[in-house]
Image (tube, coloured by chain):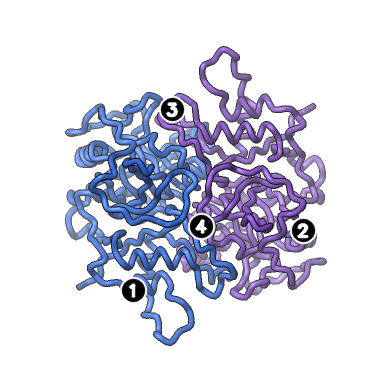
Chain colours: A purple, B blue
């Protein structure tokens, strides 16, 4: 049971559970508040419900993956993903690629076309980055290897170049639009999620459409593909996708009512500091620093009011 | 087959294969040399064979994981791991914990003691960092969120504080010694490997004993544990470990003769620059930066001379 004392970079689902289960920290304890304590003491107003129009349910044989779309960063691509989900485009699609320390990717197998509804065949706007104007920004004080400024915008990681442009970085759990070599060739029908060390060299080279907020372990814990770039060599190795639906298209009784901690809230700022300086008794040398991709973005089941 | 053009942060084994299979790049091509090209053109002297005294074979039902020990960073802990392997301590041990975006951990189940040979019960030296004196250092020019200087030492990642101390950072594939809350309570019998975004807040808080150089996907692609901190809730979920052996204790015919690219070589420096500036046609905006944990550390089967 070694290492149990490590307050870990928890899976977000687990983090939500911990928040729900953790008793309030007794005031007399010498231990600093844990992440669970901080979340358990947060005001309701520091949380926002996920918008069913921006939430996807990916149904796999092993369970449900919940995705939040990020129209702030890629309105045209997110709209196309929404249209494809509305058309049930991914019913019978599959996870076709799992490349270790890189990405899990899904789409329809070649030669298995499907109704695309109102989705566009081409999206002329690259949406690899955008103006930072008009977006809130909770900035981290620590340096980053790849960009001038890093932080959080409306529940997502955000990098900035210091010259007015911003983009969603490739952190663990981030979802991007696969494309061929020419830019603007991705229509949202093939998506990938980061399952390893953040491949930040992809930043500003692909359109980012969202992130996994629950069920990430169903995409990251799959057998790696043995073909080039981690593609599975035989169809039998693929994980079938039963469906991908917009939450707003699913009967209310089948939805999971998640809420996300606001990244412009005081609770989130407290959480960041508690992760920069790990004061739990396990830590001999707190680093006093953090990378944007290591900051948890808590999501939990909305408590009954 | 979208995203295939992405020259990926390859698994090291795949990288070795690519190096072996890639034809020399034709001189007239407009494409910049790929990682495979760079490695295929490297002089033999830029590679070093893995020392069988510093190499472990972990035999799992799905195959072999190869680990290189790092006595530069933790001589006492590495020696204890070596002694435990010599005593066949891990025969019948198991992978007991897989926490998503964090670590895979293994050891003996509680209540199943085993001969420890000459291994010590306690290691009084923490070995969380050491003097940088006497170690080669191939330094990266880009900033890091957690440490003043980053680079590579004798085939491993290395961070420095700029004040004479160095340590092995928690990059993907790095192996550390599990411990209880009090420092110096880890004896090497429980080890963990990083399987997600580098949890650098652990740096200088644990003894690092090596890294996985082949077979990483056998540790990262396992089903995540559903207990607290990713521990499996039932013994049946655990992956059994058939054995862990020092390569020098294995008959030569059963060894795999791996060699690693020297991190003080010209080829490695060329590789770093080719990854900082991705000039393949896929990339619209090369970042011009890289993080230490994103630099591949190539290992390949030693070519027949």
CB under 8 Å between discs 1 and 2: no
Tell me the chain of label 2: A
Residue, x 46% and y 28% (percent of image)? Answer: A5
- Up the image or down, A46 lies above or below B60; here it is above
Question: Would you name the residue on which mark 1 appears?
Answer: B40
Disc 1 versus disc 4: nearer the observer: 1
N-terminal of the two: label 2 or label 4? 2
Outermost residue, top side: A28
Outermost residue, bottom side: B28
Q: What's the distance in space between the residues labelled 4 and 3, CA to CA?
A: 30 Å
Q: Looking at the picture, how far across and down is residue A268, in whole percent?
A: 65, 35
* 10 Å crowding of disc 2: few (<14), some (14-19), many (20+): many
Question: Would you name the residue on which mark 3 appears?
Answer: A282
Tell me the chain of label 1: B
Disc 4 versus disc 3: nearer the observer: 3
Q: Looking at the picture, how far across and down is residue A176, in whole percent?
A: 63, 59
In which quadrant is the C terminus of chain A drawn?
top right
Q: Secondary structure at mark 3?
A: loop
Is there any visible trace of residue A94 in the rendered image? no
N-terminal of the two: label 4 or label 3? 4
Nearest the eye: A142 or A204:
A142
* 10 Å crowding of disc 1: few (<14), some (14-19), many (20+): some
Question: Would you name the residue on which mark 4 appears?
Answer: A102
Q: Secondary structure at mark 4?
A: loop
CB under 8 Å between discs 3 and 2: no
Question: Would you name the residue on which mark 2 appears?
Answer: A82
Q: Quadrant of residue B298?
A: bottom left
- Up the image or down, A165 lies above or below B39; here it is above
Tell me the chain of label 4: A
- Side (left or right) of B206 relative to A268: left
- Side (left or right) of A154 relative to B75: right
């Amino acid at each position: 049971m070694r290492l149990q004392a490590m307050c870990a970079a928890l899976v977000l689902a687990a983090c939500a559970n911990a928040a729900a289960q953790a008793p309030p920290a007794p005031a007399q304890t010498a231990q600093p508040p844990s992440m669970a304590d901080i979340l358990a003491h947060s005001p309701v107003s520091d949380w926002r419900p996920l918008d069913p129009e921006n939430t996807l349910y990916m149904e796999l044989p092993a369970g449900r993956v919940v995705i939040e779309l990020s129209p702030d960063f890629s309105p045209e691509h997110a709209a196309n993903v929404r249209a494809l989900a509305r058309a049930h485009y991914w019913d019978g699609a599959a996870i076709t690629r799992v490349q270790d320390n890189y990405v899990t990717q899904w789409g329809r197998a070649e030669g298995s076309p499907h109704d695309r509804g109102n989705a566009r065949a081409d999206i002329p706007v690259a949406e690899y980055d955008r103006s930072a104007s008009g977006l809130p920004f909770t900035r981290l004080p620590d340096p980053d290897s790849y960009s001038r400024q890093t932080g959080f915008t409306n529940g997502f990681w955000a990098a900035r170049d210091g010259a007015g442009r911003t983009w969603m970085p490739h952190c663990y759990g981030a979802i991007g639009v696969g494309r061929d070599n020419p830019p603007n060739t991705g229509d949202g029908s093939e998506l990938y999620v980061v399952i390893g060390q953040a491949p930040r060299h992809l930043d500003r080279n692909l359109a980012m459409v969202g992130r996994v907020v629950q069920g990430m372990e169903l995409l990251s814990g799959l057998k790696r593909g043995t073909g080039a770039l981690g593609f599975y060599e035989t169809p039998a190795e693929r994980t079938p996708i039963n469906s991908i639906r917009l939450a707003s298209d699913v009967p209310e009784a089948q939805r999971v009512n998640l809420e996300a901690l606001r990244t412009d809230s005081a609770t989130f700022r407290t959480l960041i500091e508690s992760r920069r300086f790990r004061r739990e008794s396990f830590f001999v040398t707190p680093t006093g620093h953090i990378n944007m991709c290591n900051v948890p973005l808590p999501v939990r089941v909305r408590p009954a009011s």
